[in-house]
Amino acid sequence: MLMNHSIIYCSQISNSYYLAMETKPRPQLHIFFLPFMAPGHTLPLIDIAKLFASRGVKCTIVTTHANAPIISQAIKTSIGFGFEIKLVLIKFPSTEVGLHEGIESIKLEKTKEMRKGLVKATTLLQQQVEQVLDQHHPHCLVADFLFHWATDVAAKFEIPRLVFHGTGFFALCALKSIMLYQPHLKVSSDSESFVIPSLPNEIKMTRNKLVPFLTLNGKTELIKLIKLSREAEERSYGIIVNSFYELEPDYADHYRKVLGKKSWHIGPVSLCNNVEIDRSERGTEGLVDEAKECLNWLNSKNLNSVVYICFGTMTKFSDSQLVEIAYGLEASGQQFIWVVKKEKNDKEAWLPEGFEQRVKGEGLIIRGWAPQLLILQHEAIGAFLTHCGWNSILEGVSAGVPMITWPVSAEQFYNEKLVTQILGIGVPVGAQNWEDGSLQSEASVKREAIEKAVTEFMVGNKQEEMRTRVLALGEMARRAVAEGGSSFSDLTVLIEELSFLGS
Ligand code: UDP
């Protein structure tokens, strides 16, 4: 029988824990992972499961049928190495919430109605997860932050629930501070800046850049879900953070000491993909040809001469915004790879006429999915124009690529501050407003701003300093995940603690 551990903290258990380790043979630790159905949440949690499995932990990933192929692909190499990692499938209740069969990921939403259905469906998985926990009796449940009910489910089985957040310490601290002190309610307009109180650095923000759940008072399903998830997080055993100590030491300390939340940093987790096929096929069921084509193109380019542009998996820009990007890139005269989440057969109203012909040889558009890890690691990439999703930032840092920042939603405006103000490894394009993905909206960043940011960065004198800094951070990232490094050691501590709790 497992103990009830919700109030046991690392420092409190240390003595009895080492005694117990010496006296009792321990069963193999078995962890269940429950990734949220969106690539930016699923991909790092698969990497985390692979990391645990590589350290001798038995890992089971719970997912749904339509999400299974990508996960199966991602764990093939680990299984080949003999690590214990497998999938358990549950049914995504698409039809129950009015969605077509097979619509099982937030990335497939096309309308607000679909988003509502998808979010609702994720709240209906609780019973099935309870059933599989009952069958398998794992020692711990690592569930995405958005599965708020996972804390209660784990408590029912008397096992710890760890939250996987998908963002770094800086954003966690900034958000928590805003929620505690409510500085955004003390300014008179959405564009008036305020200082986020009680952080290690002076960080200014405006209401325009805040996640709407702070200002909208729970009006949408997603906002309600986020509020419930925050409450469940407070009651959880602790948090797994995809970051490394050397990247944001003041904020890792602040989060733990001042904000009092127990956490383990074990990233950058994407660095566990050290076999090439895992990098080229990450997030797909097989991309080898496109990956080869894009790498061949990059092989023909000079060192640091190409801008890589990608807005992650969830950003939905209006056609008018995409047109501005195209004109801005063309006017910059810089070489680029631009990833656009459009299918090949779309009527391409988002592309200025003759654009691809004019930029031929200088610019490459990837429609759909790009092998981002491989692209960023290519020596021809000189800058990353990014929406500041946390995975993308960590991947840019790990590859030593400086950034042009264009945050759009989620916690991306905080991540921008970390990159531009604290780490000094990027420059902002000038985005001012959090966007909800309304496809009718006007372009909020105009072609002139895009041209200016890209040109100044690529031909200006700031990029060398930034590259030096980000290369050093990339080196620290690799050291952090190597044996004896800060992330490697934190994972060891976590595994030992969970093993103790489960024995
Ligand atoms: N990604 C990719 N190819 C793409 C788009 C995204 O491999 O064409 C990966 C990227 O490497 C990252 C993840 O998808 O690991 C996106 O996560 P992020 O946090 O950057 O953004 P989100 O999509 O969650 O906004």
Image (spheres, helix red, strand yellow):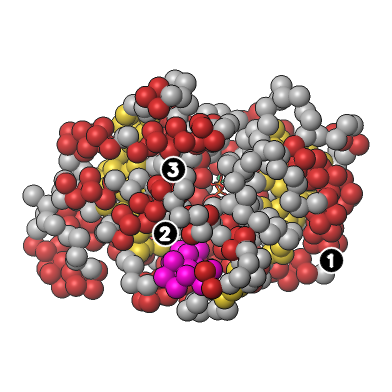
Q: Amino acid at mark 1?
A: Gly
Query: In screen coordinates, is 127 left or right of 208?
Result: left
- Residues packed near mark 2 inside 10 Å, few (<14), some (14 to 19) or many (20 plus): many
Asked if residue 77 can be seen in this view, the reply is no
* Picture quadrant of residue 266: bottom left
- Residue 398 location (% of width, % of height): 58, 58
- Label ID, residue 241: 2
The reply to whether discs 2 and 3 touch (Cβ–Cβ < 8 Å) is: no
* Residue type beneath disc 2: Val
**Dot in front, 2 or 3:** 3
User: Which residue in the protein does label 3 denote?
Assistant: 221
Residue 503 lies in what quarter of the image? Answer: bottom left
Instruction: Give the answer, above or below, for where 80 lies relative to 231.
Output: above
Mark 2 to mark 3 CA distance (whole Å): 26 Å
Mostly what secondary structure, the magenta segment? helix
Q: Which residues are magenta?
A: 171-184
The amino acid type of the residue labelled 3 equals Glu
Tag 1 residue: 460
2 or 3: tag closer to the N-terminus: 3
Q: Is residue 356 above or below residue 40?
A: above
Residue situated in front as seen by the camera: 360 or 66: 66
